[in-house]
Amino acid sequence: MKIICIGRNYSEHAREMAAELPQEPVFFLKPDTALLRTNRPFYIPDFTQEVHYEGELVFRICKNGKHIPERLALSYVDAVAVGVDFTARDVQNELKRKGLPWEKAKAFDGSAACGHFFMLSDFGNLLDLNLELRLNGQVKQKAATREMLFPVSYLIGYVSRFITLRQGDLLYTGTPAGVGPVAIGDEITGFINGRLSLRMKIK
Ligand code: MG
């Protein structure tokens, strides 16, 4: 399986990163070794002094597809979880400055935390999923799917023009504003419409 991550999908986050709003989706990949399954602790790696959490809605791809039309795209996902796109921000800034790819900052082991999946059929309207990420009980990020610059259906269609999607792939749909650093001892919790999906420790 592979992990597809969308960048800059909420305007407020693009602003906090001093990044331009994209005209089309920005995406990158993480390998399966980046996946940190439900509630496992995240160990801060030794090559960074500044790891940021990026809370994101994660959609699970449920069938294979290529060139998926947007109107059919939602039939290619069956479940949603809260995930964290852990980012070595200091390393990323250095790579950005040099115009180099971001893998060292984004794709390292454990960098894709993923919580418990809820079936999409449990939710009425995909436009009304609310993501909430808390750090040590304090709300840090809060956003609704309707605030995404590119909706999930568009993202699926767009990515599948370039890369075949396979059953079991995960789509991280970008982080809203409010990202920040983690420290040893922190606890992250993530909710979808008030339902707990993710609870994990930083070590
Ligand atoms: Mg992200």
Image (cartoon, rainbow, N blue to C red):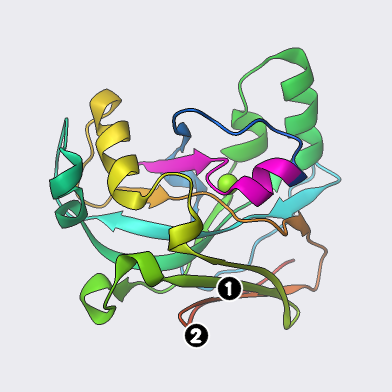
View extreme (right): residue: 49
Residue 14 screen position, x and y as percent: 66, 41
The image quarter containing residue 162 is top left
Q: Position of residue 130 (x, y in %)?
A: 48, 72
Residue found 17% across the figure and 30% down from its top? 67
Mark 2 vs ligand 1: CB under 8 Å?
A: no
Three-letter amino acid code at the position of disc 2? Gly
| Residue type, numbered disc 1 | Glu
Q: Nearer the viewer, residue 144 or 106?
A: 144
| Rendered view: 17 above or below 99 | below
- Residue 137, visible in the rendered structure: yes
Residue designated by label 1: 132
| Secondary structure under the numbered disc 1 in the rendered image | strand
Residue interval drawn in magenta:
1-15
Q: Quadrant of residue 127?
A: bottom left
Rendered residue at 28%/48% (across/down): 153
Q: Nearer the viewer, residue 20 or 140?
A: 20
> Marks 2 and 1, Cα distance to the nearest angstrom?
8 Å
Query: What residue is pinned by disc 2?
Result: 194
* x 76%, y 46%: residue: 16
User: Is tag 2's residue or tag 1's residue first in the polypeptide sequence?
Assistant: 1
